[in-house]
Image (cartoon, grey):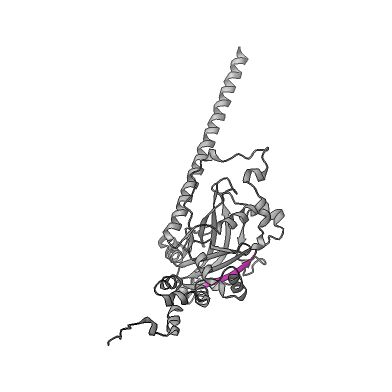
């Protein structure tokens, strides 16, 4: 069958162009906009980018979320802000001895920096859009307006460890996850026993390879948005804390310049699943999502409090980003390496202090003996 050649693109209908563009994903649509003037003009149509965002992040289909996105610049800008992952190569090479000591002469504000900016940030400024996919199939979408349970942010929230739980615990035994489960119909392998799973790890591998997480945070006041997730799991731990629990960690490295001494923090998105074995005929292996939360940790592994976390999130939405996934992984690797070096140096310093105290104690003891017998 021969294919007729098109001598002039202008002879094609604009409706045909539009039909072609609306079938593309975001990255391809952005590339197509550079192909010709017609594509460039049509690619500015907000409806196209709304379809792209709705396909990638089902949480953006809600009317209130659509209005929010339009208020911060539109769907094209939203996609450009949230599709690339946060990249932060400027991990400082801190030593434990470089950390300023918290002395009684220093106030908390002097130790952590100037917090005048905190008066301009509030928990109600932030909106979280969370989407979870398994093998490109959406299994959970949720939107959180503000920071849950942070109404009195000037009190306990400011000084307690920062944490956002996607699911609310409404009572003992309640299904607070909304029934988010994965089964063999979603592509999971059958697990006949956890002992066998310990050996071959098929279920664990399928979960790590197939699960994807997007956690977009929007600051409504400054009209900025960013995806704080790494899409794929960065690390994980199976059979913890019990034999049937799987834990995955996503996240990114956020700047904390002039907020914390370490200048960088890790945004940790922890996801936990619980396994139900197929023990009877006709039963299916299932994975139930039991927890998904966000926390911030500094280089010493300490949780960042609510006040500092709001400032870090506000600053983090201005981070550099890249569509290159390996660069995002490199940022996390550099941070993990610096974190390990700090912990090792801290242990060496504490070990040196222990030996010094022991030596001083022995010296004092013998000096006392000499004075006693003389």
User: In front: 275, or 111?
Assistant: 111
Vertical comparison of 236 with 17: above or below: above
Q: Is residue 286 visible in this depiction of the protein? A: no
The stretch in magenta equals: 139-147
Tell me, yes or no, whether the highlighted magenta stretch contains residue 143: yes
Residue 163 at x, y percent in the picture: 61, 58
Q: Residue at left 38%, top 85%?
A: 11
Residue 45 at x, y percent in the picture: 50, 76
Q: Residue furthest top?
A: 374
Residue 18 at x, y percent in the picture: 45, 81
Magenta span: predominant SS is: strand
Q: Residue furthest left?
A: 1
Vertical comparison of 372 with 133: above or below: above
Quadrant assignment for the N terminus: bottom left
Residue 122 at x, y percent in the picture: 67, 59
Q: Residue at left 56%, top 41%?
A: 99
Q: Residue at left 51%, top 43%?
A: 94
Q: Residue at left 65%, top 65%?
A: 169
Q: Quadrant of residue 309?
A: bottom right
């Amino acid at each position: 069958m021969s294919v007729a050649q098109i001598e002039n693109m202008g002879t094609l209908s604009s409706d045909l162009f539009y039909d072609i563009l609306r079938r593309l994903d975001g990255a391809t649509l952005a590339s197509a906009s550079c192909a010709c003037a017609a594509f460039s003009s049509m690619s500015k149509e907000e409806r196209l980018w709304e379809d792209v965002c709705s396909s990638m992040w089902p949480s953006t289909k809600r009317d209130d979320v659509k209005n929010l996105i339009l208020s911060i610049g539109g769907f094209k800008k939203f996609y450009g802000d949230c599709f690339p992952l946060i990249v932060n190569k400027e991990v400082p090479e801190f030593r434990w001895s470089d950390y300023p000591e918290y002395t009684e002469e220093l106030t908390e504000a002097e130790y952590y920096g100037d917090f005048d900016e905190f008066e301009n940030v509030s928990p109600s400024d932030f909106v979280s859009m969370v989407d979870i996919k398994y093998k490109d199939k959406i299994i959970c979408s949720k939107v959180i307006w503000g920071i849950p349970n942070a109404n009195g942010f000037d009190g306990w929230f400011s000084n307690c460890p920062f944490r956002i739980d996607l699911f609310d615990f409404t009572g003992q035994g309640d299904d607070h996850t909304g029934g988010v489960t994965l089964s063999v119909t979603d592509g999971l392998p059958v697990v006949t026993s956890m002992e066998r799973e310990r050996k071959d790890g098929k279920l664990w591998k399928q979960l790590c390879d197939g699960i994807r997480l997007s956690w977009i945070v929007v600051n409504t006041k400054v009209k900025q948005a960013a995806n704080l997730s790494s899409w794929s799991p960065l690390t994980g731990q199976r059979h913890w804390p019990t034999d049937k629990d799987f834990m995955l960690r996503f996240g990114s490295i956020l700047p904390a310049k002039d907020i914390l001494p370490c200048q960088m923090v890790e945004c940790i998105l922890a996801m936990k699943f619980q396994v139900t074995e197929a023990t009877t005929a006709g039963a299916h292996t299932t994975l139930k999502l039991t927890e998904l939360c966000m926390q911030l940790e500094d280089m010493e592994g300490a949780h960042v409090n609510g006040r500092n976390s709001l400032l870090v999130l506000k600053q983090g939405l201005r981070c550099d980003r890249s569509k290159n996934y390996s660069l995002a992984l490199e940022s996390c690797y550099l941070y993990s390496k610096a974190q390990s070096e700090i912990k090792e140096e801290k242990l060496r310093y504490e070990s040196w202090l222990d030996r010094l105290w022991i030596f001083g104690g022995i010296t004092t003891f013998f000096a006392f003996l000499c004075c006693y017998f003389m």
